[in-house]
């Protein structure tokens, strides 16, 4: 949670999990930059779609959970969280539908899969069967990068699949570190716990910063002559 602003503002900003959301947005950008020709409006549109769908919608649903309130669900009104989740997902899919109908119908399977995971993962449907690290890596690592490429080209390529797999593995690293870090932060009561939590935090910060900087650097390389 950020240290500036009112408690309500800090809660809503904290809900967005901006470092990780930034990673996913970078996946979409890098996936799009693999295309021979880059349509920059589509790069920006997909980043906005994932910001609304993941950064806002999925995280609001995660705060609601299905097995009792999650940490953010205890700080924010449930009715408001449902409203925010619904509106953000509706806006994300409305924008995505415009591009899929007019330019890239191949994106529909990815959009449908992401729509399933946003509920199945975050609300822990089917007794949490899809709330696992590997499904997390697929839905918020591989598919965003693949979506970025498909939105540019309306096709799938082997290089794009390789990059998507790489980002799935990076997301797997992130979630494998994030889970014990959160547990330590909840129960940190010894000096050893504090030291280990700081190490996990450093890994998470470095990982998110590296991916975001990679996305920015590659975008500038393609944008500038």
Image (cartoon, grey):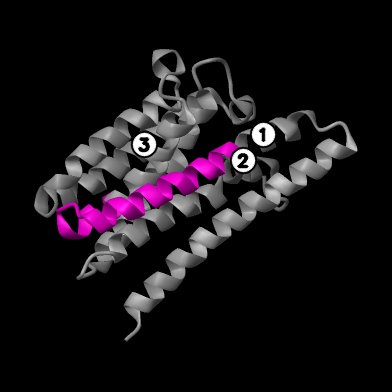
The quadrant in which residue 93 appears is: top left
Q: Which residue is mark 3?
A: 87
* Disc on res. 52: none
* Disc on res. 180: 1
* Disc on res. 177: 2
Q: Residue 104 vs residue 145: left or right?
A: left
* Mark 1 touches mark 2? (CB < 8 Å): yes
User: Where is residue 188 drawn, in percent x and y?
Assistant: 81, 33
Q: CA distance from mark 1 to mark 2?
A: 6 Å
Q: CA distance from mark 3 to mark 2?
A: 31 Å
- Describe the element under mark 3 as helix, strand or loop: helix
* Mark 3 touches mark 2? (CB < 8 Å): no
- Describe the element under mark 2 as helix, strand or loop: helix
Q: Residue 112 vs residue 126: left or right?
A: left
- Dominant secondary-structure state across the stretch colored magenta: helix
Queried whether the magenta region covers residue 101, the answer comes back as no
* Mark 3 touches mark 1? (CB < 8 Å): no
x 27%, y 68%: residue: 40
């Amino acid at each position: 949670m950020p240290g500036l602003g009112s408690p309500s503002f800090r809660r809503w900003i904290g809900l967005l999990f901006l470092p990780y959301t930034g990673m996913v947005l970078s996946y979409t950008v890098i996936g799009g930059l693999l295309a021979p020709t880059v349509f920059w409006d589509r790069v920006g549109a997909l980043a906005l779609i994932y910001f609304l769908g993941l950064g806002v919608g999925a995280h609001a649903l995660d705060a609601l959970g299905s097995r009792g309130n999650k940490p953010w669900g205890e700080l924010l009104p449930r009715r408001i969280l449902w409203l925010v989740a619904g509106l953000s997902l509706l806006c994300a899919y409305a924008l995505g539908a415009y591009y899929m109908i007019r330019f890239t119908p191949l994106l529909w399977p990815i959009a449908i899969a992401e729509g399933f995971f946003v509920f199945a993962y975050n609300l822990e449907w089917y007794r949490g069967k899809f709330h696992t690290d590997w499904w997390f890596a697929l839905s918020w690592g591989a598919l965003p990068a693949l979506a970025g490429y498909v939105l540019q080209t309306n096709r799938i390529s082997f290089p794009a699949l390789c990059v998507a797999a790489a980002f799935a593995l990076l997301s797997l690293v992130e979630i494998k570190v994030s889970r014990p870090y959160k547990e330590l932060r909840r129960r940190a009561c010894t000096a050893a716990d504090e030291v280990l939590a700081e190490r996990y935090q450093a890994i998470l910060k470095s990982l998110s910063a590296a991916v975001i900087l990679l996305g920015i650097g590659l975008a500038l390389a393609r944008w500038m002559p």
